[in-house]
Image (cartoon, rainbow, N blue to C red):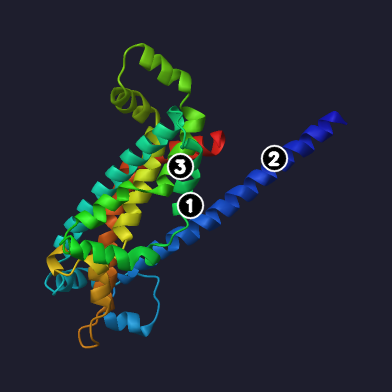
Amino acid sequence: MEKKQETNKGLGIHARRALAYVVLCIVTFFCLFWFYVLFINATRSNGEMQAGFSALPSTHLIENWTNLVHGSQPIFNGLINSFVVAALSATLCVYFSTMTAYAIHAYDFKLKRFIYPFILMIMMIPTQVTALGFVKLVSGLGLEDSFIPLIVPSIAAPVTFFYMKQYMESSLPLSLIEAARIDGSGEFRTFNSIVLPLMKPAIAVQAIFTFVSSWNNYFIPALVLHDDKKKTLPILIAQLRAADWLKFDMGQVYVMIAFSIFPVIVVYLILSKHIVQGVALGSVKG
């Protein structure tokens, strides 16, 4: 009887595992299918796409790329601009959000109970609500066509702070900080030499999220940047799509979208090891 129950239990485990693999395969297919469609369409001409969907690649990739490079959009300037803004935004956001989370986690002060929910309340404010005042401030400071308004505000990132604070509560014991202080370590040295290495998985997760969010950001850069040489890739893609019907070419649009995705893929591959580790530790410890 016991042997039969163990057999049934083993079959149940295998059935659940098989079901999990099937679901994961289905989810993976739907996640990757749209990338496949994107790269297939990048090889097709505008006329072929007007004719309908095709699952097979065509022969117009080089032609689409040549037309894009020799077109009116400064795509390489846009690539550099997007990378500078996204990289600096991710670096500043992760560093200062981690520092803020460390201050609230490691120190006791009167407003500690008030500051934490106040920062979380800021998460509820949509960007569109403050956009008009932000643009007036940028214009008043003479910072239009500058990357400063796109980079500096990323220092204050409530979502990143919240994730870092939750991660610290489970992975950064206060006894370790006290031991460093007893050994004579200064606060900045403790933070940079002890806290940041322990937070590496969480930093990698938030770095890629912030990088992708800044890379894909269209709303604020479109309000601040007016010079074509200063515009980021999302703005250039929107301008390419908004071309009049005589110049409109979906092949070029898809090539440019594919071109804009590659840097994000490279950054993800570089940080993927830490990202998977951070998500796994966060789910277990949370």
Q: Tell me which residue sits at (37%, 16%) in the image.
A: 180
Residue position marked by numbered label 2 in the rendering: 13
How far, Cα to Cα, is label 3 from label 1? 10 Å
Residue type beneath disc 1 = Met
Residue 34 placement: quadrant: bottom left
Residue type beneath disc 3 = Ile
How far, Cα to Cα, is label 1 from label 2? 44 Å
Q: Is residue 179 above or below residue 252?
A: above
Compare residues 270 and 111 and report the one nearer the observer: 111
| Quadrant of the rendering where the N terminus is positioned | top right
Foreground disc of the pair 3, 2 = 3
Near mark 1 (Cα within 10 A), the count class, few <14, some 14-19 or many ≥20, is few
Residue lying furthest top: 183
Percent coordinates x, y for residue 269 in the rendering: 33, 45
156 displayed left or right of 174: left
Marks 2 and 1: in contact by CB < 8 Å?
no
Residue position marked by numbered label 1 in the rendering: 121
Residue type beneath disc 2 = Ile
Residue 184 placement: quadrant: top left
Camera sees residue 36:
no
Foreground disc of the pair 1, 2 = 1
Residue position marked by numbered label 3 in the rendering: 115
Camera sees residue 172:
yes
Compare residues 129 and 166 and report the one nearer the observer: 129
Percent coordinates x, y for residue 286 in the rendering: 55, 37
> Which structural element holds mark 2?
helix
Q: Tell me which residue sits at (78%, 39%) in the image.
A: 8
> Which structural element holds mark 3?
helix
